[in-house]
């Protein structure tokens, strides 16, 4: 009897050990399961951490990053489990993959979620002096209903990664609201005053068709949209958008809502898919910068220098690869230019069913040859109008 009892007890404990071992193996705290789409960004995180004296071996210590379908307009979600498990919305990832700047947006997203899970960072929704988000850890509860667009590019990327690993990182130079560029030595290359309807002074032909109407209204160009689409109204010039220039005009816009955007554009537009840089404003005193090939604008800023109604004077100064924007004579923002192919189109953006009045259209360069309003503008400048879809895709919360 003793032998039989002992044998049965051995069977019981062996069975119990098997169950416990199976349970542990199903919850391996060192499990490493990262979708191949994310591996490059995990590698970058490890590299950036090592530069700052932080060593990680996720394949040894464990990490899970996987695709899922997230709700509540979320791009990513971090679960504080062992190992850390991160979910990325598959639809959002696929949508941004088809646009320029996808690599930067994906890195921002993965670094943000790893900031939560690996670095223990919480959301922080404070701003730099120039209105940029202070950290890529912005997210969660919105501030003044501001979208989560973050200008994660160029010198800003370097700052944001420094701040990710060290929250005490000092404010970067790009956040200063003191303009330090040199805009001296520039002279008119193209100038249109719209004082008369003569093409050498007015530029665009007066037109009335099924899509829009262009007229001279009290010495201003008036553009009236008849369609529920946006318009790019561009002048084909001899000024290369890759060169240094100063481009400016005054604009007044009336549209359906105060959130409709209008403003300044330039690039190599031959169709609606070409690269065009823009600086747009609305009558809610918001400012937006971006490139039409990107998923959405770089960021949204509040600028009280914008007149809520009436005329606004907009200017961009391009120096090297930097763009310096001004509104009503006040320096407003700087950022890198994303144009990498030559082009010579400069113009303005009108929202769906909007009406815009334009005046003092001016392009200045350091070249000696000048085109004056009474000179050969007609032979050197041609004009195009393009219908485009608006590009305000939603940046999801992280």
Image: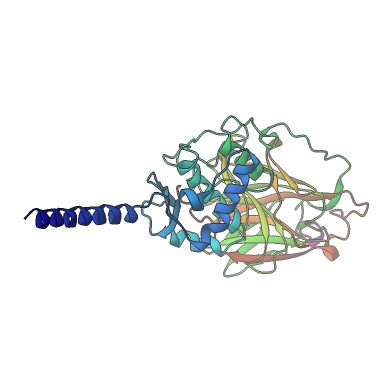
Give the vertical position of 359 relative to 237 (above or below). above
Magenta region = 195-201
Q: Colour scheme used in the picture? A: rainbow
Circle count: 0
Residue under the image location 80 percent in, 61 percent down:
237
Query: As drawn, which residue projects farthest toward the left?
Result: 1
Front-most of residues 378 and 387:
387
Q: Is residue 71 visible?
A: yes
- Whether residue 12 appears in magenta in the rendering, the answer is no
Q: In front here: 69 or 78?
A: 78
Q: Is residue 54 above or below residue 31?
A: above
- Give left or right: position of 380 versus 86: right
Inspect this view and state whether residue 298 appears. no
Q: Which quadrant of the rendered structure holds the N terminus?
A: bottom left
Identity of the residue drawn at 60% across and 53% down:
104
The location of residue 57, given as percent across then percent down, is 53, 48
The x, y position of residue 138, in whole percent, is 50, 40
Instruction: Return the residue nearer the eye: 109 or 50.
Output: 50
Residue 21 picture quarter: bottom left
Q: Position of residue 324 (x, y in %)?
A: 72, 43
């Amino acid at each position: 009897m003793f032998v039989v009892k002992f044998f049965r007890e051995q069977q019981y404990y062996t069975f119990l050990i098997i169950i416990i071992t199976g349970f542990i193996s199903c919850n391996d705290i060192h499990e490493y399961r990262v979708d191949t789409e994310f591996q490059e960004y995990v590698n970058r995180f490890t590299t950036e951490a090592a530069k700052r004296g932080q060593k990680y071996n996720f394949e040894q210590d464990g990490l899970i990053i996987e695709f899922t379908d997230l709700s509540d307009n979320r791009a990513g979600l971090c679960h504080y489990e062992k190992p850390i498990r991160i979910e990325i919305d598959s639809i959002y990832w696929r949508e941004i993959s088809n646009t320029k700047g996808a690599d930067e947006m994906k890195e921002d997203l993965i670094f943000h979620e790893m900031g939560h899970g690996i670095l223990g960072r919480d959301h922080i929704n404070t701003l730099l002096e120039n209105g940029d988000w202070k950290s890529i850890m912005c997210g969660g509860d919105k501030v003044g209903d501001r979208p989560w667009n973050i200008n994660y590019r160029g010198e800003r990327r370097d700052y944001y990664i420094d701040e990710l690993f060290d929250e005490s990182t000092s404010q970067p130079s790009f956040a200063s609201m003191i303009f330090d560029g040199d805009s001296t030595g520039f002279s008119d290359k193209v100038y249109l005053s719209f004082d008369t309807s003569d093409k050498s002074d007015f530029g665009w032909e007066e037109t009335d068709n099924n899509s829009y109407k262009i007229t001279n209204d009290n010495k201003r160009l008036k553009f009236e949209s008849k369609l529920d689409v946006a318009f790019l109204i561009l002048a084909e010039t001899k000024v290369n958008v890759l060169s240094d220039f100063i481009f400016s005009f005054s604009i007044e816009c009336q549209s359906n809502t105060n959130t409709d955007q209008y403003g300044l554009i330039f690039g190599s537009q031959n169709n609606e898919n070409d690269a065009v840089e823009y600086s747009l404003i609305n009558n809610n005193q918001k400012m937006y910068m971006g490139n039409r090939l990107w998923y959405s604008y770089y960021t949204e800023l509040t600028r009280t220098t914008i007149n809520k109604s009436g005329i606004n004077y907009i200017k961009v100064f391009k120096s090297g690869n930097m763009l310096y924007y001004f509104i009503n004579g006040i320096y407003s923002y700087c950022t890198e230019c994303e144009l990498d192919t030559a082009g010579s189109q400069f113009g303005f953006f009108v929202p769906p069913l909007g009406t815009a009045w334009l005046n003092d259209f001016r392009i200045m360069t350091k070249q000696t040859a000048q085109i004056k309003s009474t000179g050969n503008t007609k032979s050197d400048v041609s004009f195009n109008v393009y219908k485009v879809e608006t590009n305000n895709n939603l940046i999801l919360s992280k």
